Image (tube, rainbow, N blue to C red):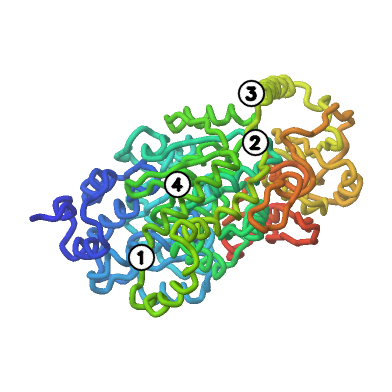
Amino acid sequence: MINPFSKLGISDDVVNAVKELGFENPTPIQEQAIPVLLEGSNDFVGLAQTGTGKTAAFGLPLLELIDFKSNKPQALILCPTRELCLQIANDIRNFSKNKPNASVVAVYGGANIMQQLREIRNGVQVVVATPGRMLDIIGRKAIDFSNVKYVVLDEADEMLNMGFQEDINDILSTTPDEKKTWLFSATMPPEVRRIAKNYMENPTELTMGTKNTGNANIEHEYYVVRARDKYAALKRIVDYNPDIFGVVFCKTKMDTQDVAEHLIKDGYNADALHGDLSQQQRDKVMKRFRERSMQLLIATDVAARGIDVNDVTHVINFALPDEIESYTHRSGRTARAGKTGTSICIINSKEVGKIRQIEKIIGKKFTKAELPTGFDVCEKQLFGLIHRVHNVDVNEEQIGQYISRINDEFADLSKEEIIKKFASLEFNRFLEYYQNAPDLNISADERERGERGERGGRERGERGERGDRGRGAEAGYARLFINVGSVDDFTRGDLLSFVCNHGRISGKAVGKIDLKGVFSFVEVESETAESLLANFKDVQYNGREVRIEMSGDAPRSSNRGGDRGGRGGFGGERRGGGERRGGGYGGGRGGERSGSGRRDRGERSGGSSEGGFRDFSGRSRDDRGGSGRREGGDRSRRRS
């Protein structure tokens, strides 16, 4: 019987390698893309969701088109993150293991560049790289791309989101004009369309499903809670799913670390993955997650790209992404390779409108779910335990030597008593914790007030474009004018970093950031405003003086309650024997505003997002990532 991959035109040595990896049949994207790419005569745009087998869709044809008798680079694959770079390189090595003389080099930040240079000098046909480290190597004149015939841009939308447009231009300018460019992406925003227009000539376009839509095997749910209850809601969702193996997404590196630390303190098996970790630390975290010795991975958008781990049951959005399209990538961490999964959003009442926007983009409706009660959680945990006991594998040889002693210990107990006591070991712990657990679901009246506030906020924002300098800051905050904006290539995250670094304040002291064209407005806690203004004396950006001053607005009458939460750290629930923590997540201003719109750029941070800040236990911490650090410090560029 002819192998399905052979029917697509793949040679026997590659087919045999693919079979050894356990792949019997091509996925839809592979089935459609491979015959087209094997022709090697056209540029190509492939749109498909994460987890659909895009790496093999372009990797297998590359192996058929490359001349392995030559040791010169013939294919360049660019991708946004270290994890994805390593994953692609390992996959292609596995696919090509029966090809004599095949060489694949992974080039990424955070690893020894001298080792990568040695591998390149020894001869290589396929280079898989992140843009920052690739530019470093090009700058050293250590690689010759004159023989490159194929360039693959994988996860193109995310590379643009991370600000790699200029780097991609610089890298592609070193490759021959007659090369073929293959672009793969999960979504098709206008920026990706522009890449296709700039770098490709009449590309063949293949779309699996509808553009920008989500995986059909994923169920989407959202829970509406007060922002101060977000962390308690997260714990309750996890407790209600005893067998959860999931990824929890936060907006910022700081939030990621804090959520992970508090979960660990509360007895959960969790760890954080973000751009400030060294490569060794990242590898250690991912090894634990892949081996399932860790139940929850807490990650930023950037750090989680390239995570290809099977059987992830849940993706939990602790904070919605700033860019709605990023939701598609987040949810794509589950339901990979045709399996099913659940994507959960924990939101406040003002974010319901954003859920509706996401629904339009992914083409699927969300289910509004109610957080389980304490009794529901206890019941679910009890029967989860009973299910595990019923299905546990018994090592007869090892346990046999202890059976007589076990029987002696239970001699005075009946079968029913043994079952009750055994089940109570786990049940009592959750029963004690959830005995007086409050209802975390907000009432219909609160939802209505939140939705009215969201609509009113949008209307005020539209009116405010004409009279922004007359709008007051929220109570307890001072509104500052600064003469830099989007024309200076600032994003809100860049501006947050710029203000924190030069003003020497913590990111937690920053409220709303209103980015305009040639100027912007930044709200900071009133007590920090004077010191910030003093620290900004003589600051310059691109050779011009930066002017920052009070906008002269009076504070609005607002109690900053409700969705902001308290100042007492994470939620007031604790898990069996753990330390009880009062207040709400966010250390004072609520989880959903903790990053103040900052986008965690991970591989290319554009500056430290936080100076010294105080964590939830009151300890002083320093979270400087280094100004302009990108890809683990492999290439620096000052942006301020």
How far apart are the two marked residues, 1 and 4, measured between alpha carbons? 45 Å
Residue 473, placed above or below residue 274: above
The residue carrying pointer 3 sits among few (fewer than 14), some (14 to 19) or many (20 or more) residues within 10 Å by Cα, namely few
How far apart are the two marked residues, 2 and 3, measured between alpha carbons? 13 Å
The residue under label 4 is: 156
Label 3: state its secondary structure. Answer: helix
Using the image, tell me which numbered label, if any, was put on residue 444. 3
Residue 446, placed above or below residue 582: above
The answer to whether marks 1 and 4 mark residues whose Cβ atoms lie closer than 8 Å is no
Image coordinates of residue 468 in percent, x first then y, are 78, 26
The residue under label 2 is: 439
Residue 260, placed above or below residue 458: below
Amino acid on which the number 4 mark rests in the picture: Ala
Q: Quadrant of residue 47?
A: top left
The residue under label 1 is: 393
- Compare marks 2 and 4 and give the one earlier in the sequence: 4
